[in-house]
Amino acid sequence: MSPWIKSLTLAGALPFMVGCALKLGWVSLPGVDADTWLWGYAVVIGAFMAGSHWGIALKSADLITLLASNAFALSVFAIALWLRTPLGLTLLVAIFAAQLLVDRRLLALALASTAYWRLRLQVTGIVCALLATYLLIAVSVP
């Protein structure tokens, strides 16, 4: 796997870290609050991963991945619109974890490489940990 792919994938978790720093008040950005930042980026990443799964499903005709990609994209969108709450954050973590299960399925079907699977394990673990941290901050800091 290209070092660029690995670096860009891991760097994709950084905005979730920025969200935590915004929520704690450690940094500020003009015109955006922590929740808008986090939820906006979560929609981008959720849709990005769903699109990745969609592309693989189209090539492989894997109906489960095709349906899952649509369900995940629409779920992240709906949660970001109507459930920006601690429950919504918990569901977001569950969706990202479930997207990882789709990647595991793709590995089992030989539609994804072991290197890709390992990278997804790493970055999903980081993202879910950062979302859990954000959740803890959100319920602790007024």
Image: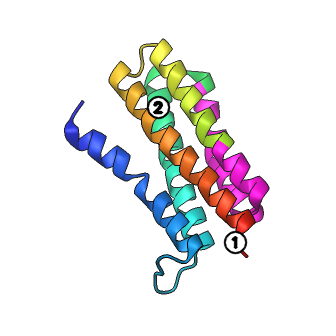
The tag earlier along the polypeptide, 2 or 1, is 2
Residue 140, picture quadrant = bottom right
Estimate the x, y position of residue 53 in percent, counting from the top left.
50, 34
Amino acid type of the residue that numbered disc 1 sits on in the rendered structure: Val
The span picked out in magenta is: 65-93
In this rendered view, identify the residue nearer to me: 133 or 63.
133
Estimate the x, y position of residue 4 in percent, counting from the top left.
22, 43
Estimate the x, y position of residue 77 in percent, counting from the top left.
65, 56
Q: Is residue 24 above or below residue 120?
A: below
Look at the image and say whether residue 72 sits in the magenta stretch. yes
Amino acid type of the residue that numbered disc 2 sits on in the rendered structure: Leu
Do labels 2 and 1 touch, CB within 8 Å? no
Image quadrant in which the N terminus is located = top left
- Find disc 1 in the rendering and name its residue: 141
In this rendered view, identify the residue nearer to me: 112 or 131.
131
- Find disc 2 in the rendering and name its residue: 121
Q: Which residue is drawn at 62% across and 24% down?
A: 64
